[in-house]
Structure formats: C-alpha cells, structure tokens
Amino acid sequence: MSGFAQNTFNGLVSGAFYALLALGLAVIFGMLRVVNFAHGAFYMLGAFGAYVLLTEAGVPFWAALVIMPVGLGLLGMALERAVIHRLTTLDPLYNFLLTFGLTLILQDLVKLRYGVQSSPYATPSLLSGSVNFGLFDFPTYRVFILGFAVLLCVAVWWVLTRTRIGMVVRAATERPDLTRAFGIDVGRWVTPVFGFGIGLAGLAGVLAAPMRAVNPLMGADLIIVVFAVVVIGGLGSIFGSVAAGFGIGLVQAWGEAYLSNFPIVSQTIVFVVMAVVLLWRPAGLFGREEAPA
Amino acid sequence: MTSTVDTAPEAARPAPPSGLVAVVRAPRWVRYALLAVGLLVAAWLPNGLYPAVAVDILCWALFAVAVDLLLGFTGLMSFGHAAFWGTSAYVTGLVAIHAGLPFPLAVLAGALAAAVLAVPIGYLAVKRTGIYFAMVTLAFAQLVYYVANEWRSVTQGENGLQGVPRELFGLDLTDDYYFYYAILPVVLLGLAAAWRIVHSPFGRVLVGIRDNPARARALGYPVHRYKLTAFVLSGFIAGLGGGLFAVGHRFVSLDVLHWTTSGKAVIVVVLGGIGTLWGGVLGAALVVRLEDWLSFSGFEAIGLVTGAIFVLVVVLFRRGIWGSVAAPAHRWAARRR
C-alpha cells in the first residue's frame, strides 16, 4: 500500500511538469493558434538559467524562481513581436516550423557554451529532507513542486474564469471575430498571453533543475511527450490539457512500477494512450470535434 | 493528359486555405527541357561533388519527395517521417547483413516494412488534421525511436548496425562513385513513381482533398482512405530513401529515427518549395551539401545553421526555391496566352 502511495505521488509530481507545460501550450494555442515547439527549449532555458545564475552569480533558487519566468516571459514577448505574429495569419504549420527552428538554435547555443554534459543543481536547503505523511517519507522538494504546480493551475483557472482579463482571453479564444466586434482589442492580449505561456515553461524548468539533470537536451524529448499529452487532453481545452498532464504522469509511474520487467513501457505508454484516445475520441478526451475533414 | 483541372493559372483561382501553391504545369517543352537538365545533372553529380555526398543527396531527394507528397499534395504535414526512413534503414541493414541479398532487394524489403508500419500510424493520424496531424505523427515517430533504442538485441542500440554490405551480384561497389550509379536507377524509379502518383486521378483527388476536404467528402470520396493511401505510399518512398541511406553509409544509427531527422525532411521540402515535388530534390541537394561543408570545416553546431535556415525560410521564403521561380514564370506565361 505504501508502495502504491509512493508511486502515485511520484506520478503526480512528474505529471505536474507535464501539466505546467501543457497549460502553457494550451493557453498560447487558444489565443494565437500557435503550437509552440520551442516550449521544451524554454523549459530547458529555465533550468539552465537557474543553474547559471546560481553558479556564476550566486543567485539562490528562490530568486531564480522569479527571475527566470519573468525574464523568459519577456523574451517570449519579444519573440512574438519580432517573428511569430508575422505568421499567425497563415497556416499554423508555419509557426510550428518556425518554433522548431528556434528550438534547434536555442539548444545549440546552450550546447556551444556549456557542452552536453548534465550539471547538478542543489536542492534549496529549506526544501531538503523529507516530510512524513504517515505511510512513508516524501521528499520535501517534491511535495513543494506538487503543491506549487496545483496552486498555479488553480490560479490560472481562477484568472481565466473569474476575472475580466480571463473573460477576454476566453472570448477571444472561442470567437475572435465576435470579440473584436464588441470593441475589445484582442490583439493587445496576444503578446502578454504568449509571454505568460513561455513564463510557465521557464518556471517548470526552474522547478525541474534540482530534480532532474540540467542539460541542453532536457526539453527536447519532454516536449514530444507533452504534445502527446495535449493530443490526449484536447489542445483546445485548458482543463483537459492539465488533467491529461497529471493523468499521464500517473499512468507512467504506475507502468514503471508494476510493469518493471518491460522498461520500454514507461517511455512509450503515453504514445499508446494517445493511440487509444485517437481511436476512441479523436478530438481528445476534453476536446471538441474539429470541422469534419 | 488533358484533364480539366490542371491548366488554370495560379492567379485565376483562389489560393487554397493552407496557402500552398496550386498545382500548375508548365508548357510541354519547358517540362521536357527541365527533365533533360535534371537527368544530366543527376548523371554528372558525383563528378562534381564528393561521391558520398552525391549518394546522400539522392537518398534525401527521395525522402523530401515523400514528405512533399503528403505536405504539398495532400495537405498533411507529417512531422514523423523519420519513423519510415529509419525503420527502412534498420530493416534494410538487417536484411543485407543477415540474408546477404543484393542491396536493391534489401532496400525493397526495408521500404515494404516502412509501408507496413505506415498503415497503423497513418490510420490513427489521419483522424486528425492540420497541426494535430503533425503532433500525432511526431509522437508516433518518437515511439518508434524508443522501441529501437530499447530493442538492443536487434538494433544494437546506440552502437548502431555496423557493416551493412553493398552486395550486388558480386560487383565491387565499395567505391561511392560506382555505388552512386548503382542506386541512381532505383532513385529515379522512386521519383518517377511520386510524379506518377501526383499526376494520376488519385493524385487529383488528393489535391482536391487538400484544398477542400468538405467538398471532396460531399462528392463521395472516402477522404480518410485517400489520405491513408497517400500516407502509406509516402512511407514507402521515404523507406526507399532510408534503405539506400543505410546501404550508402554501411551503418545505421539511432539518428535515422530521431525527431530532428523528421524536422530536417520537412524543412528540406519547405526550402525547395511545398507542393512542387522537384523543389524537394533541390532542397535536399542544398541542405546535404551545406551540412557536409559545415562538418568538413569543423563547425559543430550544425543545428544552429539548420535552425537559422528554418527560421529564415519560414519567415521570408515560404514559397521555396522552386515556388519562387515557378510562380512568376507561370504568371508570365499566363499573361502571354
């Protein structure tokens, strides 16, 4: 039983990363119709930035947790203004390709400067050690990640459903033309929303730094899994993306624990789930049907 | 070929929703002249380039044409075609090593394996369109990558398959120069097949589906089945390229299945010109040549350059090389008519 609780907990923690990344992807997609391939690269930059800040400037984890998301968010906004918005009127495939190119560039820039080896990042002292919840000891840092991610998702949900900004964003997501017709300046929100999504990816990266190996390629494989996650959840649905993120984390952890004779399972189970979802509900578990094609 | 749909000049019809170039055909003499030039260049290539690079160009040309068959003529961007290129490379390598068959048969086996793999992946992927299709194919290609990585007893994992033989009835093909001419007929057959597909009634239906899926369905075409067939054919042609690539390098590594390989195939097509078929061949030649030059001059961050090409092409040069030349030429021809 305690083994099950532990696996479930670890699944939720890795699911938290999927959820944060999927949330950023979904918000950006909703507003801009852009699938941001570079999301994984920004996650990597978040982790790497935290590492560089600590080792070269002595900036602690807590400061990095603020600096990196804000900095990357601003970088994302600049990027949106500079190139991405030029392509938003075209087929979304072009922005997919553009951000794919950006991914290669960002990855190789980091590789050129820091090499491909993984760098360790110490867990902040406040969060080292473990918490006992009765059944067994949970590493404090993982408890923190899970709590922080859940809080963040709830906060985003609250902003989207309970504030005026959220209302505008949701309206613009669903019916951009009609929203404009009501005299709401949709364009004004596009850049901040993009920056916000990128900031979320950077935040996930900083959170990942003490837990996972920090290296230039850490985001690349992850983003493909996150793509599968958003296909499962339905990219148009913000709730679906987050739920699918946590769900896939759980399924992976359980697969790893109970099918440990097949190491391939934990890596590939997400794609198998995606295949099943495509068969059963092509639009994703929480997605709406696209126009028939 | 007096079909009714292929002669309207580009300007005369509304641009397809995806912004792709419509299928237009040049006058007959221009086409024959271009064909002659293309064949001459293909026959001359290993004399002007390092033969190993020329071999790579041929393989990538097939890969690009396969991707363009989907992207340009069916309106589906596969971002996971490395799955077919790579699967065929592995199967070709294994067949050549263990069965000692002549390389064209090994490549055929590889391409067939790729086509078989394309059936389930395509069946699932064509349920989605547009950007989702790209994400789904990318994800399935990653699945294939992980399987190849774990299945070490067969694929040798990160060591790769070594010593793929170049067997052809006892001929000595170790020199890349002669090997180039040995594979040229296979490549030309593959390219001709792609051309034949695009200009067949089947290809016309694909273009119709690309431009207006709802209308194609209303006309009674089974849209999903057409897309799946195109996907499998494309997987087969990509597999031809991948198999030849394996024999050409006498080595198969996991790189052939990596997502960067899928991405490179797409950008080769965009650089050459989406929906132009032969543009992909040009794009392949340019990118392979450039990467060879970069690695020869000791530049390690090849991704930096490929990434920059991606960004520049997508922002400034979406028509690609072939499209940039062909569109004004067609306009000029239309004005004279």
Image (cartoon, coloured by chain):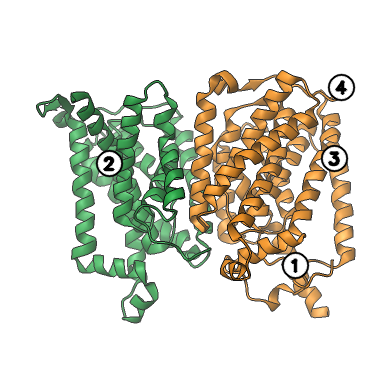
Chain colours: A green, B orange
Which residue does the numbered mark 4 point to in the structure image? B172
**Dot 3 or dot 4, earlier in sequence:** 4
Q: Are marks 3 and 4 on the same chain?
A: yes
In this rendering, position of residue A122 left or right of residue B227: left
Mark 1–mark 3 contact, CB under 8 Å? Answer: no
Position of residue B115 relative to residue B317, above or below, is above
Which residue is tagged 2?
A: A16
How much space separates mark 1 and mark 3, taking CA atoms?
A: 27 Å
Q: Are the residues tagged 2 and 4 within 8 Å (C-beta)?
A: no
**Closest to the observer: A249 or B32?**
A249
User: Which quadrant of the figure contains the C terminus of chain B?
Assistant: bottom right
* Dot 1 or dot 4, earlier in sequence: 1
Residue B185 numbered tag: 3
Task: Identify the residue at image location x=35%, y=49%.
Answer: A22
* Residues indicated by labels 2 and 1 sit on the same polypeptide chain: no
The residue depicted at 27 percent of the width and 38 percent of the height is A207
For the residues carrying marks 3 and 4, which lies nearer the camera in this image?
3
Residue B217 visible at all: yes
Dot 1 alpha-carbon crowd within 10 angstroms: few under 14, some 14 to 19, many 20 or more: some
Q: Amino acid at mark 4?
A: Asp
State the SS at label 3.
helix
Residue lying at the far front of the rendered structure: B220
